[in-house]
Image: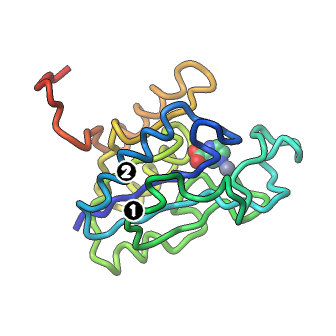
Amino acid sequence: MEALLAVDVQNDFCEGGALAVQGGAAAADRLARLAGGYELVVATRDWHPADHSSFETEGGRWPVHCVAGTAGAQLHAPFDTARVDLVVDKGTDRETEGYSAFQGTDLARTLRERGVDRLAVGGIATDYCVRATVLDARAAGFEVTVLEDAVAGIDARPGDLERAWGEMVAAGATRGQSTPDPTGSTA
Ligand code: VGL
Ligand code: ZN
């Protein structure tokens, strides 16, 4: 069975948020529309303590974002109203980045228990949490399709995004579309 895994579709990662990623809101739209088509919908949330070590205020590289319980950490509309069967919070430990939804969580076991062997993955950010989650999903033996039209990336250094795609594909993930290309183009 294939589950939809929506990575960090949260206000702080969408336009206007604390760590805004261009295209984040569009990914939220797309994932909200897709949710009804899957038997199981899993949403991850970046869910940091206020003194998380990745924050600039603590000497880290990111602005303060997705502090547990704040408005910025909530799922972004309209995905917040989509059916979500399972919410997985990650990055809750102060000292670890927690990019991957499989790091320090029960996600792999929970998915197997529910009969999931394939994942369709979308969300934010392609070159951070999506990448790390996809690589760990492959390592855990899941078939993975990354939905190119339902992700948004940061590309802090030019090339980050293409490198992330290269690593995901090299790990055996498929680069896919959530809907057939209406133009019929194969480019
Ligand atoms: C993420 C940067 C910092 C992500 C999380 O969700 O990709 N990126 N924390
Ligand atoms: Zn974070």
Q: Residue at x 44, y 53 (%)?
A: 78
Q: Which residue is mark 1?
A: 82
For marks 1 and 2, the one nearer the N-term is 2
Q: Secondary structure at mark 2?
A: helix
Q: Residue at x 28, y 56 (%)?
A: 143
Q: Is residue 126 left or right of residue 158?
A: left
Q: Identify the colour scheme used.
A: rainbow
Q: Residue at x 42, y 42 (%)?
A: 27
Mark 1 touches mark 2? (CB < 8 Å): yes
Quadrant in which the C terminus appears: top left
Question: Is the C-beta of the residue carrying label 2 under 8 Å from the nearest atom of ligand 1?
Answer: no
Q: Is residue 160 left or right of residue 61?
A: left
Give coordinates of residue 168: x percent, y percent: 40, 40
In-front residue for pair 139/21: 21
In the depicted structure, whether residue 27 falls above or below residue 31: above
Question: Is the C-beta of the residue carrying label 1 under 8 Å from the nearest atom of ligand 1?
Answer: no
Give coordinates of residue 46: x percent, y percent: 62, 57
Dividing the picture into quadrants, the one containing residue 74 is: bottom right
Q: Which residue is mark 2?
A: 31
Give coordinates of residue 39: x percent, y percent: 26, 69
